[in-house]
Image: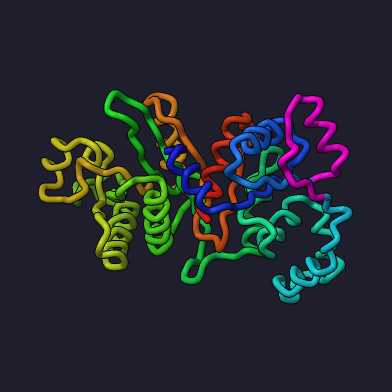
């Protein structure tokens, strides 16, 4: 999967900004990206501090651009642009103060086209990544929410198995319409990573076998998604065994184009989604890449504070691939 993504990045040069330029994990990933010469790197921070941290770790960041928010020559234009984007919700002085924070400054670099993508959150929360993105980059036309998915990859004797799972990280209790948006965005993301999406709306019920408000929620959302995207393979509501086992799927849901063959899973809420992807990761042997934020006008992604340098490197490639 990564070989193909890197090939595409070589053909389409892009720049990614890292908001935490002195973090050892970021610097190690930046060194690897520079060595690969397929993705431009911007590191935020005081140049002396960034270079000192890199030297201390033995990382070569000579190919990286270092931008210091405290001495950025384009700060006045950035403040003016940010004030316009906030439309009276923040004054120029408030924008100036916010831009002292790397998450806001980095997001504005993306908004102004200096960088194509952003990766942050190695030392701060998901909310601190999503909030500036919503305020400054905003959602795509037609989208009302930011959601997320995980790309799950497992190697086997027949090659890589890839799955997509959404939303496992952002929306605690999505409505019917939000589930539709999550499903369509997850399907689009799956395609980028070589998955031909077969989308299962998951539930504790298969085709009416169970009753309850959450069953109705999933069933109705599934029908709306089918109407919104008739060219996609979508079905539900269905239990997980019906989604992945051809025998069980066609027994419980005969004739379904998805039951037994699903590779893109839409969970009814964040509890089930988060639990589901972690079970696949810890017991199923899948590598989990994400959360990949969906629905924004530009690719901005969040790192786990427990991430390692290899995860930063791979998430940088994934994030840039979404441009």
Q: Is residue 13 left or right of residue 91?
A: left
Q: Quadrant of the N terminus?
A: top left
Query: What residue do we see at 26% from left, 42% from top?
Result: 239
Colour approach in the figure: rainbow
Q: Is residue 171 visible?
A: no
**Vertical position of residue 298 compared to residue 18: above or below:** below
**Vertical position of residue 261 compared to residue 295: above or below:** above
Is 213 in front, or is 164?
Answer: 164
Is 89 in front, or is 41?
Answer: 41
The tally of labels here is 0
Query: What residue do we see at 74% from left, 42% from top?
Result: 20
Report which quarter residue 241 is drawn in: top left
Q: Is residue 281 visible?
A: yes
Q: Is residue 248 left or right of residue 179?
A: left
**Vertical position of residue 283 compared to residue 33: above or below:** above
Query: What residue do we see at 53% from left, 47% from top?
Result: 10
Report which quarter residue 113 is drawn in: bottom right
Q: Position of residue 323 (x, y in %)?
A: 53, 56
Q: What residue range appears in magenta?
A: 45-67
Q: Position of residue 112 (x, y in %)?
A: 69, 65
Q: Position of residue 249 (x, y in %)?
A: 17, 41
Q: Is residue 113 magenta?
A: no
Q: Is residue 58 magenta?
A: yes
Report which quarter residue 86 is drawn in: bottom right
Q: Position of residue 121 (x, y in %)?
A: 66, 43
**Vertical position of residue 85 compared to residue 178: above or below:** below
């Amino acid at each position: 999967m990564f070989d193909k993504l890197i090939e595409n990045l070589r053909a389409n040069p892009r720049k990614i900004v890292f908001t935490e330029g002195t973090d050892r994990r970021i610097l190690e990933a930046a060194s690897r990206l520079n060595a690969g010469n397929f993705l431009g790197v911007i590191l935020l921070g005081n140049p002396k501090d960034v270079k000192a941290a890199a030297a201390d770790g033995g990382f070569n960041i000579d190919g990286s651009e270092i931008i210091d928010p405290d001495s950025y020559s384009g700060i006045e234009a950035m403040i003016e642009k940010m004030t316009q984007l906030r439309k009276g919700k923040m004054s120029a002085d408030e924008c100036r103060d916010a831009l002292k924070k790397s998450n806001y400054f980095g997001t504005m670099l993306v908004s102004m086209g200096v960088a194509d993508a952003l990766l942050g959150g190695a030392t701060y929360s998901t909310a601190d990544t999503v909030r500036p993105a919503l305020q400054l980059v905003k959602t795509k036309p037609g989208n009302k929410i930011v959601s997320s998915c995980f790309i799950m990859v497992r190697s086997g004797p027949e090659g890589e198995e890839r799955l997509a799972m959404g939303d496992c990280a952002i929306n605690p209790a999505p409505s019917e319409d939000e589930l539709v948006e999550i499903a369509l965005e997850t399907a689009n993301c799956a395609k980028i990573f070589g998955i031909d999406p077969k989308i299962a709306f998951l539930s504790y019920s298969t085709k009416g076998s169970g009753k309850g408000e959450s069953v109705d929620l999933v069933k109705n959302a599934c029908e709306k998604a089918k109407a919104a995207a008739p060219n996609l393979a979508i079905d539900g509501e269905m239990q997980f065994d019906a989604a992945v086992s051809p025998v069980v799927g066609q027994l419980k849901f005969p004739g379904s184009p998805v039951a037994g063959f699903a590779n893109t899973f839409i969970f009814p809420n964040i509890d089930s989604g988060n639990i589901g992807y972690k079970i696949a990761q810890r017991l199923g042997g899948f590598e989990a890449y994400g959360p990949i934020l969906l629905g924004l006008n530009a690719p901005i992604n969040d790192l786990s504070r427990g991430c390692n340098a290899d995860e930063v490197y791979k998430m940088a490639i994934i994030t840039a691939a979404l441009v």
